[in-house]
Image (tube, rainbow, N blue to C red):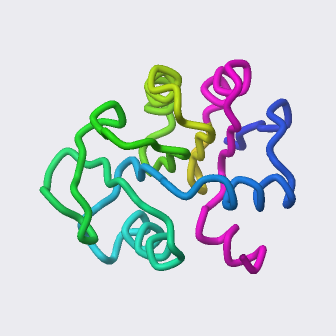
């Protein structure tokens, strides 16, 4: 079944460039310690490009040399963007946590992850919402 995302306006290329220029700290929701998993590859790439990453994962103490947190709300530093590698239904609570924090500017749902209601709620509350796109692919595509 094809998901309809036509009612959610997403940032254009200039907007995505702006996201990467303003968001230097990224919480990676569902960052696997397995180097073969997409979440690990993307996080490692972003880290090498100079972004500060905060792994969110239910196990492990460190991933990619960074302290692992169990929840977005546990991170004591400022977080500009959340990049989610979990099932679409998790996005609802993720948006709530991002709004509760008050410092998150962007909620990014990875390629293949679509939750229109969560993205709409994020936008209605002043956040930028991106869905069904990969941060690594977009960064490379835009030659940043």
The image shows a total of numbered marks equal to 0
Depth order, front residue of 100/78: 78
Q: Quadrant of residue 2?
A: top right
Residue 19 drawn at (x, y percent): 70, 53
Q: Is residue 135 above or below residue 89?
A: below
> Residue 142: within the magenta?
yes
Residue at point 51%, 50% (across, down): 83
> Residue 97: within the magenta?
no
Residue at point 77%, 38% (across, down): 5
Depth order, front residue of 26/107: 26
Residue 131 drawn at (x, y percent): 66, 45
Q: Quadrant of residue 20?
A: bottom right
Residue at point 18%, 62% (across, down): 62
Q: Is residue 107 above or below residue 34?
A: above
Q: Quadrant of residue 126?
A: top right
Residue at point 39%, 47% (across, down): 29
Residue 35 drawn at (x, y percent): 30, 76
Q: Is residue 122 above or below residue 2?
A: above
Q: State left or right for residue 144 relative to residue 91.
A: right
Quadrant (top left, top right, bottom left, bottom right) of the C terminus:
bottom right
Depth order, front residue of 65/29: 65
Depth order, front residue of 117/135: 135
Residue 134 drawn at (x, y percent): 61, 62
Q: State left or right for residue 116 relative to residue 7.
A: left
Quadrant (top left, top right, bottom left, bottom right) of the N terminus:
top right
> Which span of residues is magenta-colored?
115-144
């Amino acid at each position: 079944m094809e998901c309809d995302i036509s009612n959610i306006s997403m940032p254009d290329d200039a907007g995505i460039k702006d996201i990467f220029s303003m968001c230097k700290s990224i919480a990676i929701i569902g960052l696997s310690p397995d180097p073969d998993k997409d979440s690990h590859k993307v996080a490692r790439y972003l880290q090498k490009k100079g972004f500060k990453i905060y792994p969110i994962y239910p196990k492990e103490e460190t991933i990619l040399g960074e302290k692992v947190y169990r929840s977005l709300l546990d991170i004591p530093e400022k977080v500009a963007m959340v990049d989610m590698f979990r099932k679409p239904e998790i996005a609802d609570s993720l948006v709530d946590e991002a709004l509760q924090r008050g410092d998150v500017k962007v909620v990014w749902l990875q390629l293949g992850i679509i939750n229109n209601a969560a993205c709409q709620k994020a936008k209605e509350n002043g956040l930028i919402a991106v869905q069904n796109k990969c941060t690594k692919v977009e960064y490379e595509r835009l030659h940043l």
